[in-house]
Amino acid sequence: MSKKVQRFLVRVCPAPDHPEYYPWQTAQLCLFVGDDDRSKSFKTACKEIDRKHWLPIGPFTKETLIEDCVLADKRGKKVTP
């Protein structure tokens, strides 16, 4: 089991075959992928975006969330990885 979660943020627009939205309706997606390998998790995120009929229209923001740091921040403590 991975100890890290990769968070990806990206602006998207619906693909022409999107079942619910029109191509001019843009959104910002936030995806969480539980994997220690950043490149593998990026591929997983891209596949999920495609599977849901979205098209990236901006750069990806990528961050690794470390459980201990997230929990410490939630409790108001500062921890560096």
Image (tube, rainbow, N blue to C red):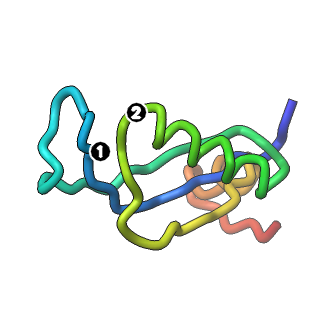
**Which mark lies nearer to you, 1 or 2?**
1
Give the x, y percent position of residue 48. 53, 37
Q: Residues within 10 Å of mark 1 (few under 14, many from 20)?
A: some
Relative height, residue 18 to residue 7 (above, below): above
The residue labelled by disc 1 is 15
Q: Residue at x 60, y 65 (%)?
A: 62
Q: Residue at x 21, y 27 (%)?
A: 19
Give the x, y percent position of residue 60. 51, 67
Badge 2 amino acid: Lys
Most extreme residue toward the front, as rendered?
A: 16
Q: Residue at x 29, y 45 (%)?
A: 15
Q: Residue at x 68, y 48 (%)?
A: 43
Under circle 1, the secondary element is loop
Q: Which one is in front, 30 or 20?
A: 20
Badge 1 amino acid: Ala
Would residue 55 appear left or right of 32 to someone viewing this image?
Answer: left
The residue labelled by disc 2 is 52
Q: Which one is in front, 64 or 23?
A: 23
